[in-house]
Amino acid sequence: FLQFFCAMDEDEGKVYTWETEYERSWETLQEDAEGHLQTTAEEEAYKAKRRRLFDRPRNVQLGMMRHVFLVLDGSRAMADKDLRPDRLTCAARVIEKFLLEFFDHNPISQLGTIVTRNGRAEKLNELTGNPHVHTKALQSLTSSSGDPSLQNALEMAVRGLRHVPHHASKEVIVVLGSLTSCDPGNIFSTIDDLCQQSVRCSIIGLAAEVHLCKTICQRTNGTYNVILDETHFRDLLLQHCRPPPAKATIEASLIKMGFPQHVMNGPPAVCLCHLSDRSADYITSSGYFCPQCNSKYCELPVECKVCGTRVDMQSVLMTTPTHGCNTHTLTRTHKHKHTNANTGLTLVLAPHLARSHHHLFPLTSYEETQLTDMIVCSGCQVQVERKAYKCPSCDSMFCIDCDLFIHETLHVCPGCASTVKHHH
């Protein structure tokens, strides 16, 4: 009898198999015209990806240098099991995938992470361009407790973005699982501060729609969505990988950027990225050295903390650095006549700018074509039966997998690149 009660204590908090929701896996199957079984879930995934491509704004200038704070709800509401195994673990798993996609699409941007719980906000990481730092911090979040404080989280994000240069876009992305918020003051004053600082706030709800969240997103020109399931959650979060449109009241100007050299066997020193971390692990002989002040950094892109003031301006990247030069002037927009003492020289690599070029000139969407005969995909050479996607410029036909790969990863049409007209 005593052993029985001990077993009950050990199993306390666990859920029996018959108490969990079951999956209707047979509902994802349907029969096509030829009698073959096909999965509707895969079709819905393809439709969702194509919606992302078709919803891409055309002829719109994008703010490619982004400074984003990602706020994650760590309250007791994240312990609910409507997402498996629970909301917090599912959100951390989806955010890890988002981080890799974000820095792949925005190589010259920076992101920071904040968690809110117990009525407080805690900054996990400052703004950085290294996704592995954020992944390590998310993996340390193993428990949820208390209530979130949306006001404290937003104010902490605003303070972190206050000294961001004016040529960069300032954004806050909130993943909120709770329907309540424990705030110390008037949150509408915080919303006014967001508008004054031109911070764009977007919220993804995991439970239900909240009027306050909708108001925040409307006033800051952000987006507000409530998820349906984990797949929908991932799609909504990946939509934020695309840079937002830049302001309409901007004019062409210039900004100076530095292209540091990577030294492998230099004198052992601590980089400025980890100057506050008193650990021997950060004393290395390799790193990137600023061409202007020779300060050492272990990762790029980064704002040099030692370089002096510069004129801040907002951007359209139109050129790349010439061979043999360490600094270069890039075309940017939104000129400001004052100097910001808190902003140093922006240090990037030439491949970072090259990977951002497709935001300026996005590849045209392919036209969906119904096939009467079987064809061969121009990309992977696989036979295509029902639907193909045709490039309007070179009339090359691609399968949907190649279409998604070309628009989301390659950003260059293989058919157009192989024509004589394109080379001329």
Image (tube, grey):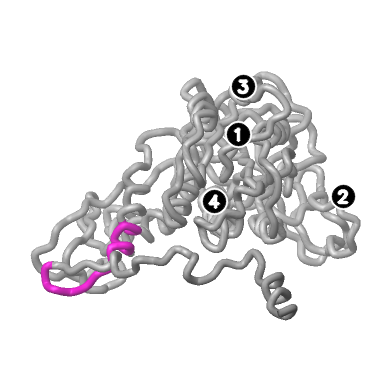
Crowd around label 1: few <14 · some 14–19 · many ≥20 (10 Å): many
Q: Is residue 379 left or right of residue 60?
A: left
Marks 3 and 4 sit apart, C-alpha to C-alpha, by 30 Å
Q: Position of residue 128 (x, y in %)?
A: 69, 48
- Residue corresponding to mark 4: 102
- Residue corresponding to mark 1: 170
- Residue corresponding to mark 2: 276
Asked if the residues shown at circle 2 and circle 1 are in contact, with their CB atoms under 8 angstroms apart, the answer is no
Marks 2 and 1 sit apart, C-alpha to C-alpha, by 25 Å
Q: Is residue 408 left or right of residue 203?
A: left
Is disc 4 placed on a helix, strand or loop?
A: helix
- Residue corresponding to mark 3: 188
Q: Is residue 119 left or right of residue 322?
A: right
Q: Nearer the viewer, mark 1 or mark 3?
A: 3
Asked if the residues shown at circle 2 and circle 3 are in contact, with their CB atoms under 8 angstroms apart, the answer is no
Residue 50 vertical position relative to residue 197 in the rendered view, above or below: below
Comes first in the chain, label 4 or label 1: 4
Is disc 2 placed on a helix, strand or loop?
A: loop
| Residue type at numbered disc 3 | Phe
Asked if the residues shown at circle 4 and circle 1 are in contact, with their CB atoms under 8 angstroms apart, the answer is no
Is disc 1 placed on a helix, strand or loop?
A: strand
Q: Which stretch did the figure color magenta?
A: 33-46
Q: Nearer the viewer, mark 2 or mark 3?
A: 3
| Residue type at numbered disc 4 | Phe
Crowd around label 3: few <14 · some 14–19 · many ≥20 (10 Å): few
Comes first in the chain, label 3 or label 4: 4
| Residue type at numbered disc 2 | Ser
Comes first in the chain, label 2 or label 4: 4
